[in-house]
Image (spheres, rainbow, N blue to C red):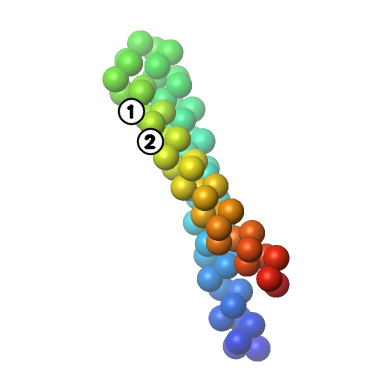
Amino acid sequence: MYETLSEIVPELLYAVLASALTLLGLFVENTGIQTLGSGDTTMGLWMTAVGIVALYAGFKLAREKVVPGLRAA
């Protein structure tokens, strides 16, 4: 039982982290686009860049850690 639990917990943590990064990226990206629309170009571009990085990190983590872990299970 403990062997199975020790295999599941890291995969679950990776899935939660990937989801959190993706949601954070979507939120920051949306805020950046709204900021760009209001006329603050510098802050809007900065927020959209941070949102893109967070989205990329979330998708990369999901693709490299979560999906292979689910296929192995």
Q: Residue at x 46, y 30 (%)?
A: 29
In the foreground, 61 or 44:
61
Residue 14 in the image, given as x and y percentages of width and height: 53, 62
In the image: residue 20, left or right of residue 63: left
- Quarter of the image with the C terminus is bottom right
Mark 2 lies on residue: 50
Residue 57, compared with residue 28, is above or below; it is below
Q: Residue at x 56, y 81 (%)?
A: 6
Name the residue type under label 1.
Trp
Q: Residue at x 60, y 88 (%)?
A: 2
Q: Secondary structure at mark 2?
A: helix
Residue 39 in the image, given as x and y percentages of width and height: 35, 11
- Snapshot quadrant of residue 8: bottom right
The Cα–Cα distance between marks 1 and 2, rounded to whole angstroms, is 6 Å
Residue 50 in the image, given as x and y percentages of width and height: 38, 36
In the foreground, 56 or 47:
56
In the image: residue 27, left or right of residue 5: left
Q: Secondary structure at mark 1?
A: helix
